[in-house]
Amino acid sequence: MTNPYHVVVCASVVPDPLQTLEPITGPSGPALKNEMMLPAILDPWASHALYEGANLVKHIAGSKLWLVSMAPKAKLQQVMMTVAQKVPLQLVAVDGPSSGFADAHQTAHALAAAIRAIAGIDLSRLLLFGGWESASRSAGVTLQLIGEELGIVDQFQGVDAITPQEDGSFEVLERVEGARHQVSLCAGPPAVLGWATGNLGEPRNDPQVGMANMRTIMPALQRATVASISADGMRYSNVATPKQQRQTRIVKELPAEDIAREIVQWITQE
Amino acid sequence: MATTVPKVRSETLRTLPDDNVRQILWHFADRYDLQMLVQSAREVARGPVARLVSEGSRGTHEWTSKKAKLLEAFDQSGITAVFMDPEHGGYLVGPKNLALALIAFELAWVDAGAATCSLAGCLALAPIHERGTPEQRAHYMALAAPPAPGEDRHTYRGAFCLTEPIPYVGVDTGMLSGKVRITEWVDGQEPLLHVEKRGRFITNMGFANFVTAAVDSGDDRIKGSCMVIIEESDPGVFDRGTPTRKLVHQLSSTCDPIFNVHVPASRIVGGYTIKDGAIIPNYSHSEVIEAVFKRTRVTVALMTSAKLLSAVEPIIRYQRGRFRGSEQAKPGMLRYELGLQQRQDALHRLANLWAIGEAGAALGFAAARLYDEIDPLEREKDAILAAKGIRGGKAQLRFFRDVDQSALELLRLEATAEEKRNRDVYDTLKNDRLVEFALKDAVANVLCPAAKLWNTGTGANSMREALSLMGGYGITEDCPGFLAYKWMDSQLEATYEGPEAVQRRNLSVTMTNELFLAQFRQWIAEMRRVAEHRPGTGACTLATAMQLWLWTYRHLRVTTDAYGGALYQSARQGVTFPLADALGWLLATRQQTLDLIELEAKGPENPVLAEGLASTLGFFTDLCHIQAARAAGEVGRICAELVFGYNRHPAWDDEGYKGCYQSDELDSLEGLIPGIASCATDVVGPDGSHPAKAGPCASCQGLEGFQRLRSKLDGCLTGAQLAKDRLAEALSKVMIPEALDYPR
């Protein structure tokens, strides 16, 4: 079978999507109202990457999985109480902002440094996983920038599957238009894979896995390096949440065919 | 007059309290194992459990295949294994009371029936865990743990069978109809027993593989009662019985089973000894039950509190959105933005129920933590007593008389200035594990029934109020947060594992323990100290209410009623039970205040909380204040009724006239003391005429101490309504999520 992979999943925390997200202007630029106090979750896009990474590692003997995450340490610890129960992992914590308005270049630089500093990592075996988007601001650039910093030129975005081959190469499915996938064959690691949803469901919480993970997660949080991400030179001209659209008509006794036709028309309109 | 808190706080509560706040309040911020457990239980509660409720699975009392899926969810999420020690397939080391309490809280946040379903399995195992032989523990605990990866077996599930059809065991656990007899006893071999038992309202019975059943001896060769373990494969009848036609807790299976089986004597929980040709169980059924219930009742208490706190968010959302969509409420208008929260009553009532939920949760979790402390102490105590050869309840009681005296001495020394203490004696007593056990046990014996009684009883009343805050929506199946179900369920929580009368009876005994009362006196001083530094908490009000309660108790112990009957005595439940009710208010509110202090102390250590800590503390301070005022009101009313209510009211007779002024007498006195007539309330005319009322006003001779305290207590309510106004303001501004996070 193939050579083992060193899978690094980059994932930050985002406010629980059920919370009220209200942009405000803080002392260092745009922020969300009460952001620190809102319950947080692991970024859903990156979560898919984590589950896929864990699955890959489970099936390729000798492979390893690290979760590299930059967020306020206390916030990250709280999120780990759930994430740690999902899959076996080793956490590399970077104490820094998790706000969607943090500079992606500086964030990528800090994360790349944290990845390089992982003891025992073989960058030639590296598969850098993350979300192709983010639930915070959907800039979707941080992962690519980390790849650039680490000199990884094989980058895939919108990934839904990775299939290792016998010769050490792997096949990647990337989402393209029209519900189709683009199939690529990559000669081997290192590579960057920005995941879409993948194919795996969210694993159930398993406290036994959590207890095992926590033996390394708590020390990792304690020795988290501090990343100072500056807002200097950054300027957001406008910040707003997507507008909710609600156009309601009450029409009685409309045939199902007409309703369907109207929906299709609405979907296909510009 | 100066006030210590502002009319409006500069910062009001920003968001609803999250896990960071709760972990500190309930003292598990340093326990990541419990934090993970909470997340795990929450996922089950807000996922599979909530989906079952919303799909209508509560519509039947039958145990269905859909409901059975819950058991798998419990297994997979680690809920089932929480009760087990690691050597038996569990993953938590040490006592589990707080862990089980947190699971109950999380599950009941969505549906208390699911919580009951989960906890009933623990209840079945508890007799084995607490009093079982090592072999019984190893066997059944391992079987009840979910299979490890690669293990091919199913999880063994249990039911606890005590309650029997009327007129047998129920409220009175001593009236057992179930019998155990010896059917075969070959010399040198283990006796074979015949167990007959009919159960009623037995939880988990629809799927249990084994049952721990309470039975009495029906054979001269078996002494006393015991608990036995029955398995579904035992020869004889293992009839699960008909499902109980209950209206509540529909996500748990409840049946009225019938057992008529043969089991080996090794199934007697805790084993037995043979003496003079008779089997003597090592533990009677009541000894086993006592050890079990005093722990498990705490988790039930927390269910109702969880539901109250869970009601806050849906109520706020309903209140705010009440008029949205109407022609008269356009965005930007107050009616649109605030809805019902424009009006004070909706907000004040919401604040009341939130405060009761907080107080109940504080009390329940404090009791659970205390049992976590007591568990290892109790094992040490058992070992010490065994080493001393002290066996049996009476011998233990005799032994503990001396220990209790030592504990009282320790409390006396603690109340003495440090420089005046006998250091050696103090150190010796402080390090004495038996003394520590006696002190904690005395408190736990009060906190457990108090939590079960107060949390469920007051909680059930408050849940009704919660429903009323949702209008007609509240009593529909569609009500967000399933509030109607939660309200109905709370009646069962107030009933099972010992209904309110049992808890009152229990409390009316344990609260008279001098060891408890001595600590209670210390708590009064503690609340005064809290009040000195945190005047807005209502701690001073609470301290005065505690004083009043203590005064009343002492008074009732030595006073008789109008006919010479002793007041505080076992049979006089009209005296003892209300006093027990009053104590519940005090204990819950005290614990709520202590938790606030914990948040104040530990909150700054958590950077996530730092940003909004001041506003959170301010809000919780005001919650404590209104709860203290409410407790004071309840205690004042109850105590006044008891202190005055047993005296005969004076009548317009010769005896009554003795305490009245005669009108001519008053006229002459008026000449000497001008104005005295205006102070006289009861004046009798020369023709015997008197004011139109029931009789002369009752004399308060001998009750001046009470009156002073009562009057002081009324004054202590100063500021409480201002706190409520601030809470109302905060509730109308707090940021809530866009939608409820269940069903997921």
Image (cartoon, coloured by chain):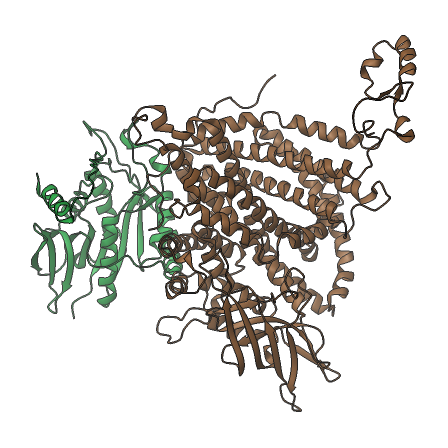
Residue A220 in sight here: no
- Residue positioned 44% across, 34% down in the render: B613
Q: Is residue A27 left or right of residue B45?
A: left
User: Residue A127 falls in which quadrant of the image?
Assistant: bottom left
User: Residue A19 falls in which quadrant of the image?
Assistant: top left
User: Considering the image in quadrants, where does the N terminus of chain B appear?
Assistant: top right
From the viewer's side, name the closer residue of B59 and B625.
B59
Chain letter of the green region: A
Residue A166 in sight here: yes
Residue A120 image offset from top left, x and y in percent: 26, 58
From the viewer's side, name the closer residue of B265 and B248.
B248
Is B623 drawn above or below residue B672 in the view shown?
below
Residue B602 image offset from top left, x and y in percent: 49, 40
Q: Write down the colour of chain B.
A: brown
- Residue positioned 74% across, 70% down in the render: B389
- Residue positioned 32% across, 26% down in the render: B329
